Amino acid sequence: MNYKKDVPVILPKDIFIGHPKAPVTLMEYGDYECETALHDDLIVREVLQRFPGMVNFNYRHFPQLRIHQRAHKAAEAAIAAAQAGKFPQMHDLLLHNRRNLGTASLAFYARDLGIGGINFLDSLVTGRYGQYVQDDLVAGIKLGVKEAPSFFINGVKLEGRITVRNLCEHVEAACRKKSRYVHKML
């Protein structure tokens, strides 16, 4: 990976899983050490499968440092992996290994994905992507996020715990709303 200062950084707000032009954007403010992170991700994956081409997913970082000291560095590793086009793979590894997010483990995961090495480790040690994690925190707070996970559909905050059922209902409602808007424009 090349970390020259003049190379633009792919920001978390610009990293999507799913169809890039989908009419519905599901956004999560999450913490890789959160107890429910993997469970919530399985729900998100199910919804993406049920609505192919209709939903994309944007993961934003909201590490709760008072209780999860390694979540910030894990978020930095996810951003670093995104620079090499490996965000979904790193995201998956971080979620499956939420109890093993020390710097050495993060470097091992990166090496496993073929993006490790001195540049990746250097980016973690120096906090190269730390400001982007902080930017996500600030953006989340401005949107009313108080804890992770917090979910939004097309910018509207969802209240309560998500389930496959209620998230599908929210996606269907957003699709209907988008369809009415497009119909009015025609």
Image (cartoon, grey):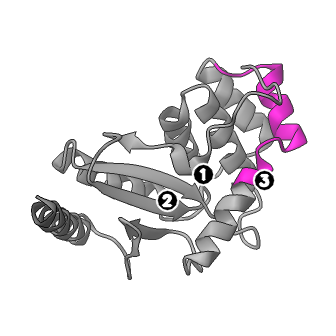
Q: Residue under circle 3?
A: 131
- Between 152 and 111, which is closer to the camera in this rendering? 152
- Asked where in the image residue 90 lies, by quadrant, the reply is top right
Q: Tags 2 and 1 in contact by the CB under 8 Å rule?
A: yes
Residue at image location 61% in from the left, 25% down from the top: 84
In whole angstroms, how far apart are the C-alphas of marks 1 and 3? 22 Å
- Between 169 and 178, which is closer to the camera in this rendering? 178
Q: Tags 2 and 3 in contact by the CB under 8 Å rule?
A: no
Residue at image location 82% in from the left, 41% down from the top: 128
For the record, the magenta segment spans: 115-132
- Between 94 and 183, which is closer to the camera in this rendering? 183
Q: Residue under circle 1?
A: 98
Mark 2 burial class by Cα count in 10 Å: few <14, some 14-19, many 20+:
some
Question: What secondary structure predominates along the stretch shown in magenta?
Answer: helix
Q: Residue under circle 2?
A: 37
Q: Which amino acid does label 2 sit on?
A: Ala
Judged left or right of residue 144, residue 28 is: left
- Residue 164 spot, x, y in % from top left: 24, 63
The question of residue 124 being in magenta is answered with yes
Judged left or right of residue 146, residue 131 is: right
Res 42 visible = yes
Quadrant of image for the C terminus:
bottom left
Of the image marks 1 and 3, the number of the one nearer the N terminus: 1
Q: Which amino acid does label 3 sit on?
A: Gln
Q: Nearer the viewer, mark 2 or mark 3?
A: 3
Judged left or right of residue 100, residue 129 is: right
Of the image marks 2 and 3, the number of the one nearer the N terminus: 2
